[in-house]
Amino acid sequence: MTSALADLGVISILVLATVGLLIGTLGGLLGIGGGVIAVPVLLEVFALGGMSDADHAALAIGTAQAAILLSSLAAAAAHAAAGTIDQPVLRSWLPAILAGTLLGLGLAPLIPASLSVGAFAAVAVLLGTQMMAGARGVLASGLPAPPLGWLPPAAIGALSAALGIGAGTLSGPVLGLFSTPINRAVGAGAIFNIAVALPATLGFAALGYGKPGLPPDSVGYVSLSAAILLALPAIVVAPFAARLSSRLPVPLLRRVFAACLFAIALRVLWRATFGQ
């Protein structure tokens, strides 16, 4: 592990730890898994390692899922203690999210790196737009009934697993489309993060197991040192942020998060276009 940390470099270590603090804050406040932030940062870090585009993209996604798993455990525990987990939403969506996760893991090896980067940026822009729209972005007054109602959570599971996005990052805005208040979606989002991140972490670890050229501490497409650097600060701050989630102005948080999503999408597209 010491050698792996040295390979990352001091700047990368500080950046990952800082991103971990942001992941924990967003996870506690809004139920966001943090992959939408972690993946672009990990792409930057792993691009310095001389791997192929496909390998460093897969390593970024697998490592982000591991970090989401660890940080979301702390956030979910805090939301459970605060009673902010919406049980009806959880029971309605969790089985379909798990099914979609398995589909996403099956598709992940088949998706070209350029397509996954483009899809990641597109999802970030769409989520940011929905977050900015607020009440104007509502499609219906309640969740659609099965079997049609299984499609949104299944799509969330598939996209989250394949692209390294925390399921709570997607479930919050999507639940908002069906008039679910953000403060009701936050706790359920933390559980959805765990439901996707656990099988996704195991899947990416198995997919890259024994592959040459990966960092020395990697288990398949999961860098242990990078995942821990992201997760530890997140674990520390997530419970405090979760307790604050019902007290801070949600409209302001939505606008700030939307701005972050737009910035991330632009950066990812810039790297995909210009390679820097």
Image: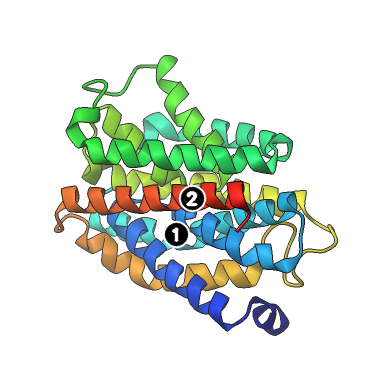
Above or below, comparing residue 224 to residue 270 in the picture: below
Q: Is mark 1 on a helix, strand or loop?
A: helix
- Residue drawn at x 37%, y 59% is 75
Residue at left 39%, top 35%?
126
**Residue furthest to the front:** 274
**Which of the image's four quarters has the C terminus?**
bottom right
Q: Where is residue 81 in the image (x, y as percent from the top left)?
A: 28, 59
- Residue 65 percent coordinates (x, y): 56, 54
- In the displayed structure, 264 sits above or below 42; it is above
- Asked if one can make out residue 235 in the rendered structure from this viewpoint, the answer is no
Rendering quarter of residue 181: top left
Mark 2, Cα crowd under 10 Å, few <14 / some 14-19 / many 20+, is many
Whether residue 217 sits left or right of residue 274 in the image: it is right
Q: Which residue is drawn at 56% across and 39% down?
A: 118
- Residue 243, compared with residue 163, is above or below; it is below
Q: What residue type is labelled 2?
A: Ile
Mark 2 near mark 1, Cβ–Cβ under 8 Å? yes
Q: Mark 2 points at which residue?
A: 194
Image point 50% across, 59% down: which residue?
Answer: 38
Lower sequence index among marks 2 and 1: 1
Q: The N terminus lies in which quarter of the figure?
A: bottom right
- Residue 55 shows which numbered tag? none
Left-right relation of 122 to 131: right
Label for residue 73?
1
Q: Which of 48 and 168 is in front in this view?
A: 48
What separation in Å lies between label 2 and label 1 (alpha carbons)? 7 Å
Task: Name the element at disc 2.
Answer: helix
Residue 221, position as x, y percentages in the image: 71, 56
Task: Please say whether residue 215 is visible from this viewpoint.
Answer: yes
Quarter of the image where one finds residue 224: bottom right
